[in-house]
Amino acid sequence: MLDLNAMGQRARRAARALSLASTAQKNAALEALASALTERASDVLAANAIDMERARAAGTTASLLDRMLLTEARLAAIAADVRKVAQLDDPVGEQFDASVLPNGLRVHRRRVPLGVVGVIYEARPNVTVDIAALCLKSGNAAILRGGKEIMHSCAALTEIIRDALLAADLPADAMQVIDDPDRPLVEQLLRLDAYVDVIIPRGGAALHTFCREKATIPVITGGIGVCHVYVDSAADMAKVVPIVRNAKVQRPSVCNALDTVLVHRSVAHEALAAIARDLLPLHVELRADEESLAILQTAGLAGEHVVPAQASDFGTEFMALILSTRVVDGLEEALDHIARFGDHSDAIITEDRAAADQFVAAVDSAAVFVNASTRFNDGGQLGLGAEIAVSTQKLHVRGPMALRELTTYKWVVEGDGQIRP
Amino acid sequence: MLDLNAMGQRARRAARALSLASTAQKNAALEALASALTERASDVLAANAIDMERARAAGTTASLLDRMLLTEARLAAIAADVRKVAQLDDPVGEQFDASVLPNGLRVHRRRVPLGVVGVIYEARPNVTVDIAALCLKSGNAAILRGGKEIMHSCAALTEIIRDALLAADLPADAMQVIDDPDRPLVEQLLRLDAYVDVIIPRGGAALHTFCREKATIPVITGGIGVCHVYVDSAADMAKVVPIVRNAKVQRPSVCNALDTVLVHRSVAHEALAAIARDLLPLHVELRADEESLAILQTAGLAGEHVVPAQASDFGTEFMALILSTRVVDGLEEALDHIARFGDHSDAIITEDRAAADQFVAAVDSAAVFVNASTRFNDGGQLGLGAEIAVSTQKLHVRGPMALRELTTYKWVVEGDGQIRP
């Protein structure tokens, strides 16, 4: 069995070197990685073929097989993403909150890498490279543990990543993979607090709960959430359908996709009828509370894809072409509903500035939107260039976790012999 | 037994109201609290007397009894600290990283309270008020659990705190205390992730380890650390003794007090002799490595308070008038030593700019000092006005945790109907 303690020690040592690497050196490693992904594609595809064959033999579903599959085109896309990361600003070394204290001490906070990041993910080999690129650029070492279904793919990719580090005169041990499917190794990683500074799980709710339960290291969880759009009495109806459609239909399997529409009673008829006319032909199932169901029936829109909502249809992340709808008394009731079920991405559609301000102030979610689709809660869309995860917890990072969020800071205090009185 | 789940629900509801309170309203509650600490002193002192009597009967040590004791003067000092918190800037609502994206979306991040803070502390009743004041000002609800030795004092103080909240039209449930000494309640608090956003333990290493092991909620640990001063070959000798004395002697029982001096070989004789001549009369015990012991003996300074260092004397937080000393080859060896044992407060004494820069870049501790005492790693000293803890972990906050560090942020995205392409 792998010696995780030794891996941790090596990662810690490598992290120290990586934290001092120049931006140019880190970018050189990223460029070497991007090139090798194309040049050594056949090695990776051969390893991936082994994973695919085993998965097929084990009766893996078509959608999971597709997520596992690497092709030359996919590797080229991954390489392009690596080059994009090379172009992003390096957050390490940024100084902020600089001041000179009355006693003459010159103080600032300086951004430094987190150190060693442990990432646990599922059967998506591309995540190996995504994470390595972001960790490398932000000066962090990483210990990766991909799903056991993609062990061979991960090992082949990690070999390329380690060679790219060496090519830039950086320590290969900055990127290590746990290429042993033994499950207790995951628990060991979660307790490696002597060497690992943060755990980032990328997967479903069960993985997140498992990490929170078992880890003695801080865990950043996210990527899961129930998203709401509230259609206010002062909504511009021309904005309602495009936003709801975009948020629900464009990519229903992701965490910032819409789950529930709340509609102010005064505009419920118009809004719900418009939404239903737009979404039903797109194969969206509507799960309507009693009042919205009655409205849809009155509007002649009650077909087999319009069903009564159960209590559990509120507060559920559907990840599918399903939308729950509810009529509310007004903004206060919408806020209560979102306070109960939301924490990820929630939007109001309104032309009333006061209502928008109240919504923005009161909704305590990672991202709050006014007249825009919830799908914008994404590192690339919000101008951060990339993301390793979308956090829904409060500590350290909320929403997209990009390069800056992969750093911490230290205090730097410079004096001329000052002592504390 | 207390129903922690119900407490959590009440705290969450109160947190929602508190997050929307104005600065004036929060300051009014702080002022009411400060006044009541004086006006209702007799209630608090009566409760404290019960705790003191039981502790004395149980044979509690004098130093612990002193930490437990409240007096009119101490209550007045606590009230003064509460008024200081009222004067600090309110971080809630601050906006940063504002931008307009190419698609016209107006984006910013906005500071909001963390939500519900769980604090576990030991037999120091004043901590109850310190924490309540900082949480209140930063818009956070709190669930407090003080040491069982001070249950009555905590309960009396919490009653005053809750009345002050009500006086300012804020929900009393924003501050709740677990006034039941039952130990399993602590474990329940650590697993109350449905309602509590962060756990802050204030106590010794055993408490911190317990919290990390048991919590399913993010824990902010700190307040423990081995601090170093490295005397470089280019040190100004006139700065060495004052800084070492201040860092070691001024308050040896706190986390930013000095534990180990590392001395460059080229100045070892002069520096160690000067340090020993200064500290030995102040009853500091020196635990010297072989080379520094020989130097001290040569200088005629080897008395009963100069002893050979054991391996365990490096990497130990002494919390007492003990200092370990070691001669090093140079900066690199000092950096290796600090990388192995340091993470809290580490200083270099040098007039060599390049050496100082290298030290600052390479030392990965919460605070790094050049020509200044490690004792400045403190919220008050670094200009933050106050602190709830000094963090040595990487996530969210490093060094002093003050008002701003008791907040998180949310993304606010405002548009005119934008959808994701």
Image (cartoon, coloured by chain):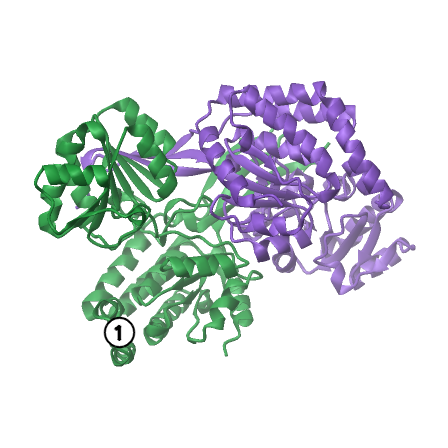
Chain colours: A purple, B green
Relative image position of residue B189 (x, y in whole percent) = 50, 66
Specify the quadrant of the image occupied by residue A110. top left
Relative image position of residue A28 (x, y in whole percent) = 55, 19
Q: Residue at x 56, y 35 (%)?
A: A402
Name the kind of residue labelled 1 in the image.
Answer: Thr
Label 1 is found on which chain of the structure?
B
Camera-nearest residue between A110 and A160: A160
Relative image position of residue B91 (x, y in whole percent) = 41, 47
Camera-nearest residue between B306 and A391: B306
Lateral position of residue B133 relative to residue A298, left or right: left
Q: Residues within 10 Å of mark 1 (few under 14, many from 20)?
A: few
| Residue A205 in sight | yes
Q: Residue at x 24, y 71 (%)?
A: B61
Q: Residue at x 42, y 57 (%)?
A: B208
Specify the quadrant of the image occupied by residue B77. bottom left
Relative image position of residue B390 (x, y in whole percent) = 35, 50
Residue at which label 1 appears: B60
Quadrant for the N terminus of chain A in the image: top right
